Image (spheres, rainbow, N blue to C red):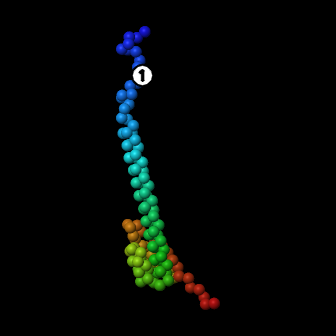
Amino acid sequence: MLPAHMAPQAPSRRRERGVFLPAFALWMAVAVLCAVLVVGVAGRASERAQVQSFADAVALAGAAEGEAAASRIADANGAELVSYRQNGNAVEVTVAAFGVRAMAVAERQIRPAA
């Protein structure tokens, strides 16, 4: 038999005290960081979709009424008409807003009189 001072003892709870709060704080920091990243990525995707919608509207206006109408639609949406190219009935535009660029093409349809 071992002397009392060498006998195995149960782990002391004293050394484990106060571990929960720092571990919880670390996990909360990681969760908040992940949430911020998700919100940032979703916001950027939303901006890209919005700028693409602007470009589509600008291209349609340009195909229907010309470059001046395309520029008016871009300005009305808070976007900048970066480029405008017309090739026959087709119009290709590039629009910039929120630091994002988008390109769209539209074609004017000429329907024969009925």
Task: Assign a secondary structure to mark 1.
Answer: loop
Does residue 114 appear anywhere in the picture?
yes
Pointer 1 local density, CA inside 10 Å: few below 14, some 14–19, many at least 20: few
Residue at 40%, 50% (x, y): give it. Answer: 32
Tell me if residue 66 comes above or below residue 9 in the rendering: below
Kind of residue sitting beneath label 1 = Ala
Q: Residue furthest bottom?
A: 113
Q: How far across and how far down the image is residue 110, in percent?
A: 56, 85
Q: Is residue 30 above or below residue 12?
A: below
Q: Looking at the image, can residue 67 be seen? A: no
> Please, which residue is most extreme toward the top here?
1
Image position, residue 93 (x, y; %): 45, 75
Q: In the image, what residue occupies the spot 43% across and 9% down?
A: 1
Hey, which quadrant is residue 12 in on the image? Answer: top left
Side of 19 relative to 62 (left or right): left
Which residue occupies 45% across, 59% down? 42
Quarter of the figure with residue 73 = bottom left
Task: Tally the numbered discs.
Answer: 1
Picture residue at 41% right of the left edge, 18% below the top: 8
* Quadrant for the C terminus in the image: bottom right
x, y percent for residue 75: 39, 77
Residue 73 or residue 16, whichever sits in front: 16
Q: Which image quadrant is residue 3 in? A: top left
Name the residue tied to disc 1. 10
Residue 87, given in percent of the width and then of the height, sits at 48, 80
Is the residue 33 above or below the residue 104 in the image? above
